[in-house]
Image: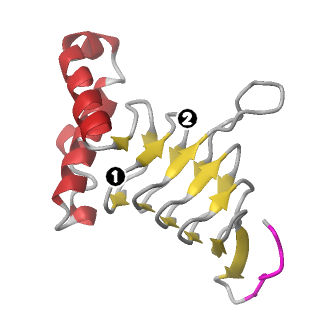
């Protein structure tokens, strides 16, 4: 993939959403700069500008070390917090108030961050914390608190999140994740 295609890989997915286009363009640029020590030194002012403008002013925390697949979409980015150790797949949707990251364990250490598959739609005010895996083609309903892995092709809701339905047809309403 060429450099400009890399920078604009989320552009079409966020058609009509100027804020998302701007933030994701700036994220892809800072992510590319982060790969090379010399670029980090040369573009240090941009790294600081990104942190101030995107993270502090706009309220969208997408750290420069974060791994995100192409075609990320976000709506109403306020309060969006994603830990740098998180891995997000392709064609995912994040909404306002989403928090994704590690959790503090009983011994005081921190868990690994979540791994989110492809085509995952995350509703507003969702918290995904801990060493969990979200499978491909998952929908997570508004306000869910995900502390356990969710299998592929599922819909999860609630606090703590539970699998409401498997998109292949099997209902699992009473099963916790």
- x and y, in percent, of residue 113 in the image: 62, 40
Q: Residue at x 53, y 44 (%)?
A: 87
Q: Is residue 84 above or below residue 164?
A: above
From the image, tell me which residue sits under label 1.
78
Q: Residue furthest bottom?
A: 169
Circle 2: is it few (<14), some (14-19), or many (20+) Cα within 10 Å? some
Residue 85, which numbered label?
2
> Compared with residue 168, is residue 23 higher up or lower down, i.e. above or below?
above
In the picture, measured across the screen, residue 72 lies left or right of residue 46, that is right
Q: Main secondary structure of the magenta part?
A: loop
Mark 1 to mark 2 CA distance (whole Å): 20 Å
The percent position of residue 30, horizontal first and vertical second, equals 28, 31
Residue 97 drawn above or below residue 64: below
Task: Kindly identify the residue that appears in the image at 49 percent across and 34 percent down.
Answer: 84
Residue 129: x and y in percent read 64, 47
Give how far across and how far down residue 69 sits, in percent. Answer: 42, 50
The picture quadrant where one finds residue 163 is: bottom right
Q: How is the image coloured?
A: secondary structure
On-image quarter of the C terminus? bottom right
- Which of the 4 image quarters holds residue 14? bottom left
Question: The magenta stretch spans which residues?
Answer: 170-176
Residue 99 magenta: no
| Label 1 CA crowd tier, 10 Å (few <14, some 14–19, many 20+) | some
Instruction: Answer with left or right where residue 173 lies relative to residue 157.
Output: right
* Residue at the (61%, 52%) spot, across then down: 128
């Amino acid at each position: 993939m060429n450099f400009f295609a890399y920078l604009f890989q989320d552009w079409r997915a966020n058609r009509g959403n100027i804020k998302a286009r701007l933030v994701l363009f700036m994220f892809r640029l800072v992510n590319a700069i982060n790969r090379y020590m010399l670029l980090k030194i040369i573009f240090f002012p941009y790294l600081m500008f990104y942190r101030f403008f995107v993270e502090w002013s706009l309220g969208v925390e997408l750290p420069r070390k974060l791994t995100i697949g192409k075609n990320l979409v976000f709506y109403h980015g306020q309060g969006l917090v994603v830990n740098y150790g998180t891995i997000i797949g392709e064609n995912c949707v994040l909404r306002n108030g989403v928090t994704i990251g590690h959790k503090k364990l009983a011994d005081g250490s921190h868990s690994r961050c979540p791994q989110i598959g492809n085509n995952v739609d995350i509703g507003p005010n969702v918290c995904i914390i801990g060493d969990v895996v979200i499978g491909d083609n998952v929908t997570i309903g508004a306000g869910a608190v995900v502390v356990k892995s969710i299998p592929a092709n599922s819909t999860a809701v609630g606090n703590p999140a539970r699998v409401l339905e498997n998109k292949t047809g099997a209902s699992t309403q009473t099963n916790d994740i």
